[in-house]
Amino acid sequence: MQIADRLKKIPPYLFVELRKKINKAKAEGIDVISLAIGDPVEPTPDAIIEELCVRAQDPENHRYPTDEEKGMFAFRREIASWYGSRYGVPLDPASEILALIGSKEGCHHFILGCINPGDIILMTDPGYPAYRASILMGGGEPYNVPILAENQYLPVFEDIPSDVAKRAKGIFLNYPNNPTGACATREFFHRLVDFARQYDVAVCFDNPYSEILFDGQERLSFLMAERAREVGVELNSLSKPYNMTGWRIGMAVGNPDILAAMSKVKENTDSGIFNPIQYAAIHALKHEAANIDNMLQIYKRRREVVLETLRRIGIVFKPPRGTFYLWVPVPQGMTSLDFTDILFDRTAIVVAAGTAYGRYGEGYIRISLTVPDGRLKEAMERIEKAFT
């Protein structure tokens, strides 16, 4: 039986491989603590679950979802209200908002809707691995743009060769950034819009960590920049702010033409999001801002626990101010894989090697704060004991 050639270009998905490693070790009786995957362990707020249950009792909601692939208008209207109140960004629910089955599918539909085979798509290195997979599945050619500590992990557009920029048809960006935790600035957004307009590059700005911020970092949307919606769309999700990763619900907002193209892909791919999940999401956006504040306090506390432990074993650095990850430099003389292997062998702790996110991730590991306090404390005790 023939398997599509396009799949041969795609490396194994990082998190699937990590889960295999964890499950194998657990099967051997090893008490593994995973700090590798960003999946909040705290439950979805009760009122959101209750809204789902109530709506699921209505037989009308057992049929195909309202407005199918675009998302029910009430949900899109609430997204517009949320963007207006949190970012000061006005949106038209009819033409500038598209409901998503999580922001990850938005990345894929952006490629299928906007990119032709052979087109260059820019993505950062290090960067979220799913961008590369979507580009390759769509027949595009990924081009890595380095993001380095000395540039606050922001791309330097002037360093992109002009011949590459002229061929580029799209760019993936993600701030607050996975894996580095770096945050963008208003000034950077203006430069991004200028670059996109100069070279006619469609922007897919992936913003699912928009609410996970520390130390007074300003909450930002790409669409706050003047003329941003002329050149791109922003993806967002309820996964991180409302502990709803498994619910698979998010949104794409911005340029109507790009959204129409993505919607055409969706209408030929899926039949939309289960109505009760959309009603639950409406409740979340309207009433559960307190959950965001609560989770920020939890992540801030865990962040300090990890940073203090790392200081005690001689790893001192100033972390960026976004996401629930820490982008940690490895000890001198080690590679990223060396350190991840040593950590696992000595402590049974799994972290993500920086090189899983690209060549320029060498020298770092990524630690996730989405583990229970007790397990995180135990992990830090194991690390301190192993390295002091």
Image: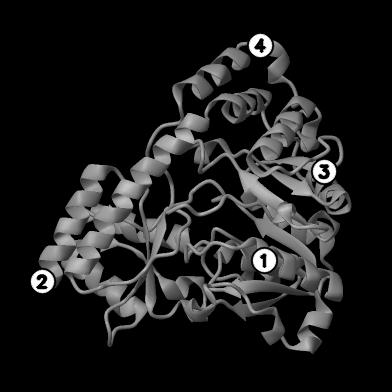
Circle 3 residues within 10 Å: few <14, some 14–19, many ≥20? many
Tell me which amino acid carries mark 4. Answer: Asp
Disc 4 to disc 1: CB gap under 8 Å = no
Q: Position of residue 283 (x, y in %)?
A: 60, 24
Q: Which element is circle 2 on?
A: loop
Q: Which element is circle 3 on?
A: loop
Disc 3/disc 1 C-alpha distance (Å): 24 Å
Disc 2 to disc 4: CB gap under 8 Å = no
Q: Find residue 132 and report its image quarter.
A: bottom right
Disc 4/disc 1 C-alpha distance (Å): 48 Å
Q: Is residue 140 above or below residue 56?
A: below
Q: Position of residue 5 (x, y in %)?
A: 69, 71
Q: Position of residue 45 (x, y in %)?
A: 46, 27
Find disc 1 in the rendering and name its residue. 187
Disc 3 to disc 4: CB gap under 8 Å = no
Find disc 3 in the rendering and name its residue. 96
Q: Which quadrant does the C terminus fall into?
A: bottom left
Q: Is residue 1 visible?
A: no
Find disc 2 in the rendering and name its residue. 388
The residue depicted at 65 percent of the width and 23 percent of the height is 279
Q: Is residue 46 above or below residue 91?
A: above
